[in-house]
Amino acid sequence: MNLIGHFSARQGRTVQTAIIGTGGFGRSYLAQARLVGGLACRVAVDRDAGTAAAALASVGVDPARIVPCTDAAAARAAWDAGHWIAAGDLAVVADLPLDVVLEATGDPEAGARHAQLAIEAGHHVVMVTKETDSVVGPILSRMARDRGRVVAPVDGDQPSLLIGLATWAQVIGLRIIAAGKSSEYDFVFDPATGQVVSNGVTVAAPGLGDWLDPADRPWPTVAAGRARALHALPQRAVPDLCELTLVANALGFVPDRADLHAPIARIPEVADLMTDRGGLCRGRAGWTCSTACACPERSVSRAASSSPWPATIPTRGTCCATRATWCPATGARR
């Protein structure tokens, strides 16, 4: 795709945005928005206006042009004067003529509140906070759709890339057997010592070598054997669970098993592992499973992420705050 042609409609139009949460992502967005034609971000919101103002100044905005605002009237006056606006609450700036609000606090409860406020004010929402999206994403999406607005994950992160890949496959007529992503863990196996190194931790993995050659054994048996051999190392990560829940909600998938697949496999094994010889997904369409990697003979591969939880999530806050920059309830920066 030629992106210049794809975005040619932006000529002569500026999309006005606001960023909520000025941690690493928020500051990066503020800096990048100053370079993108047709995009503007003159509004930053954080736990207090001073923090938001400091973030704006840190990306090169003239401090004399930054106006900390504590009420809607001050925000409107600053907007009309062409200034940058720093606020400690989205409610202060919600009524400004914004097109899109980006939620990047990393706090699930704050994210839900901000998204609701933005939707009710008539704005589209880009949800950077996967912790919110994984818990109430479908509810927010429905609220936005009822008002002719959109709530979408941020493009370029793993969930959006997986959603894009899966929907591309569906559009061209392929049937999806499994969908997943690599996880936080790398396994490096030394057959001479029988040890495995993962993220700086070295453990003995007795019996792992026996499971590296699947031969003609059923894949579920092979996967279980590899998992037992590496039981001393983590094979699932909270960020993966949040991200794949987000994907499941977007695609309408559900997990294949309650405790979530996290198979350890070489990349060339993944397709067979899912469906061949009694594979993990048993050939059923519409299930999400993880992809994992085994790492024999000193080669480094990515370990598996597990499949998403159901779209209806009975627990609250299970995947919370893995990337939070601030917490509105306590005022703590994380």
Image (cartoon, helix red, strand yellow):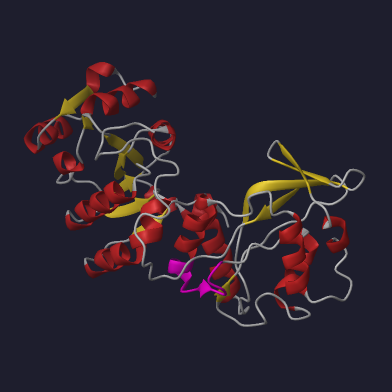
Point out the image quarter for the N terminus: bottom right
Position of 71 with respect to 284 (left or right) is: left
Q: Position of residue 293 (x, y in %)?
A: 73, 56
* Front in this rendered view, residue 208 or 140: 208
Check the image and name the residue furthest to the right: 192
In which quarter of the view is residue 77 placed?
top left
Residue at (48% x, 52% y) in the render: 155
Residues rendered magenta in the picture? 248-259
Q: Is residue 249 magenta?
A: yes
Residue at (28% x, 50% y) in the render: 109
Q: Is residue 197 magenta?
A: no
Q: Position of residue 114 (x, y in %)?
A: 25, 49
Above-or-below relation of 173 to 104? below
In which quarter of the view is residue 91 placed?
top left
* Residue 132 visible in the displayed image: yes
Above-or-below relation of 164 to 52? below
Above-or-below relation of 250 to 300? below
Above-or-below relation of 139 to 125? below
Residue at (30% x, 66% y) in the render: 139
Residue at (68% x, 39% y) in the render: 199
